[in-house]
Amino acid sequence: MLVNAERGEVLLTIEDVELVLAAEMRGLAALSSRLRCQSLADLWGRLTAMEVEAVLAGVECLAIRGDVAKALQALKVKHFKACQTAFIHALNYQMGEEGEGGNGAAAGDATKASHGGDGSSSPSEP
């Protein structure tokens, strides 16, 4: 399902139209704004619940290659499960839960590099 594991690119086929989706930050931001999501959890829930507007917006905002207009024209409810699977793979990659990429490793490194100490004392204590 991954087209380019280095970038978390996922293949989605709708009828005879092949799209490549990726959960890139700009696409996620556009998708979140369009759906008026309050959090990543809200966005995840709407995409994985296969809400009609979320699927349409997800395909449009997360596609990085392919004929999006043709895919949206061909899209039917029978394709929603494939869309859901593609969204899950792309989001999991971005969160570092699939493959070697994503931001999970960076988040772990940032935690280690934190200057906040071990959390056992407040910043005002010596």
Image: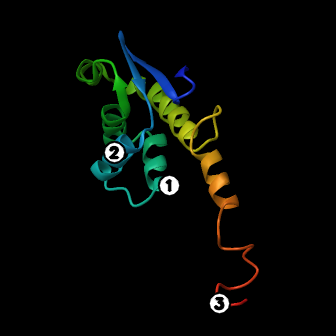
Residue 119 lies, with reference to residue 123, above or below; the image says above
Residue type highlighted by circle 2:
Leu
Identify the element where label 2 is drawn: helix
Residue mark closest to the camera, 3 vs 2:
3
In the image, 84: left or right of 104? left
Which residue shows up at 48% across the image and 28% down it?
81
Q: Nearer the viewer, residue 12 or 25?
A: 25
> Residue 65's x, y, as percent?
35, 21
The N terminus sits in image quarter: top right
Residue type highlighted by circle 1:
Ala
Residue 25 lies, with reference to residue 1, above or below; the image says below
Which residue shows up at 23% across the image and 23% down it?
69
Separation of residues labelled 1 and 3 (CA atoms): 33 Å
Residues marked 2 and 1 touching at CB (< 8 Å): no
Identify the element where label 1 is drawn: helix
The residue under label 1 is: 41
Residue 35 lies, with reference to residue 51, above or below; the image says below
Dot label at residue 124: 3
In the image, 33: left or right of 2? left
Residue type highlighted by circle 3:
Ser
The residue under label 2 is: 31
Which residue shows up at 65% across the image and 65% down it?
114
